[in-house]
Image (cartoon, rainbow, N blue to C red):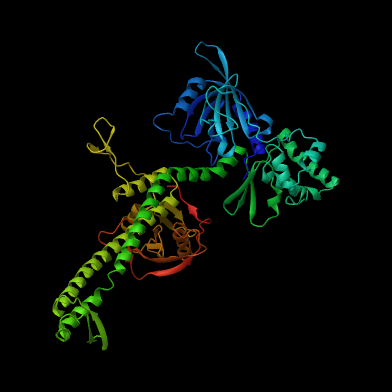
Amino acid sequence: MAFDGFVISNLLYELNEKLVGGRIVKISQPEKDELVITIKNYDQYKLFLSASAGLPLIYLTEQSKQNPLNAPNFCMLLRKHLNSARILSITQPDFERIIQFEIEHLDEMGDLRKKYLIVEIMGKHSNIIFCDEEFTVIDSIKHISSFVSSVREVLPGRKYFIPKTMEKLDPTIISFDEFKNQVMSKPMSIGKALYSTLTGISPLLANEICYRSSIDSEASTASLSEDLTYHLFQNFIRVMEVTKSKEYTPNIVYRGKEPVEFSSIPLTCYQSADGYEERDYDSISGVLEDFYASKNTVTRIRQKSADLRKIVANAIERESKKYDLQKKQLLDTEKKDKYKVYGELLTTYGYQAAPGDKSITVLNYYTNEDLDIPLNPEISALENAKAYFERYSKLKRTYEALSKLIVETEEDLKHLDSIRTSLDIAIAENDLVQLKEELIEYGYIKRHFVRGDGKQSGKNGNKQKKTKITSKPFHYLSSDGYHMYVGKNNYQNDELTFDFAIGNDWWFHAKGIAGSHVVVKSNGDELPDRVFEEAGSLAAYYSKGRENEKVEIDYTEKKNVKKPSKGKPGFVVYYTNYSLIAIPDISSLTLVSD
């Protein structure tokens, strides 16, 4: 995947066609490093911008995102200056991964002023920067001080400039002599020479240029003759000509249902590869939205669930240490039965001990062997027997208490493991809300208190009301038309199994590991074998074993699944079950949008 200068040139062409001359009618900031700008230009367009370190993006979208109740300061600043402003031009300086919006607006005095909104797509250094007409930074979505970067500060009042950390050549104006002497003269692989020396060229594009030239991108530049160098240059120029002719071909390469690469030109390096399919799109924005939408969602959910993950990880670590200590203490009680035997034998044979003896050897009638029993010479044999019985009773009480505590700790660890697995399959914020409620209910998170004035209070006040839960189970359709449901968390698992499913519906779960409950609505039918296989794949995929090649799945009719008294959410027992081996691959299944 390559959000490189070439793709940005395609995006620039698209944005210029649709946005230049348009007016900004709405600005929102759904996340701390995201903007959505609505532009009216005959039609209405929504421009999505993200400076996320993990997934920086910019494209036109039709999707809507929920906005915070109070707009962040950067958003308020942009609204102040850019509401009703007109976009004059959109440019890409030096084929860099930078898009620069030139914007005209009326100031407080009614005079026309220019501003610049600059989007830098540069991995962890990505940013959205707002400048005046002199390119002085007014503000940015991320503040970068000299403590963070020695190359460039991005702070209000500083001059904006494009950092030149490496002297690269502009691929749109390069000559053959420059290509030969400054690019292919580098002592490295041919592909690396292309993407490390030329601005905006990604490893993917470099590999494609080499493939079109029938040259191994991993071969050394030293292996190129002058003729081969010229042949490579000609194919390079043909690719770069697309940026001038604007004959872009936005596309995504799929392997099955999984998108693996995207580009603005046909990727011939995949066309002869088995299992790959290239799908063309009308716009590069459509490509970016389809390719990155799920990845962006997953990235955001991972970020938003980080605190919950830390809480769960800490709780698991704490419970694991407790479990290890309890098991060690349980080992210390193993001598209890020996002390009981000592007491019984001394009660029987104690008369044989002489005053002051430090031990006695007697016949152990349990094993029919002689046994040496240590004695306290300061007390009688019967008093020694009593002391051994007391030690036995104390260790027995400890054993019984520890055995109960160990079972409770094991259940707590299984419960926490199930929550951790649920965090792995969460796909939306409302999924996290339900998981947080479960952590609150079981004491892993303290529920905040709210005073009468709405402010948080440590002790006094009313408990904060529970957040309304809108998360729903996954809903799939089998190849034979049967409805299959997957719980996203323990509460949903209980609801699916005990409130939604009926007696002759089928229930599936990964054997012996944390995972979702899967319910197949049978409608009273005898299900085809393929339905069992597909439901098994769902149970495997939505479990702790999803990264394994195969997962063992237990399944039974719902009527055989029971909820233990006082059992934690999601915990069940079941009888008369069957087993199957499932592959955790659900790419062929249809997810239903309820």
Which is nearer the eye, 266 or 318? 318
Residue 552's place in the image compared with 273, above or below, is below
Question: In the image as oriented, which residue stretches furthest toward the front?
Answer: 356
Q: Residue at x 47, y 34 (%)?
A: 32
Question: Could you tell me which quadrant the N terminus lies in?
Answer: top right
The percent position of residue 294, horizontal first and vertical second, equals 51, 45
Question: In the image as oriented, which residue stretches furthest toward the top?
Answer: 109
Residue 419's place in the image compared with 4, above or below, is below
Q: Residue at x 50, y 37 (%)?
A: 63
Which is nearer the eye, 425 or 95? 95
Tell me how many marks there are.
0
Which is nearer the eye, 144 or 191? 144
Whether residue 181 is visible, yes or no, is: yes
Left or right, 590 with respect to 287, comes to: left
Whether residue 571 is visible, yes or no, is: no
Q: Quadrant of residue 333?
A: bottom left
Left or right, 410 with respect to 292, comes to: left
Left or right, 426 with respect to 158, comes to: left
The percent position of residue 550, horizontal first and vertical second, equals 50, 64
Left or right, 166 with respect to 187, comes to: left
Question: In the image as oriented, which residue stretches furthest toward the right?
Answer: 227
The percent position of residue 579, horizontal first and vertical second, equals 43, 69
Q: Residue at x 39, y 31 (%)?
A: 69
Residue 336's place in the image compared with 138, above or below, is below
The percent position of residue 371, horizontal first and vertical second, equals 26, 84
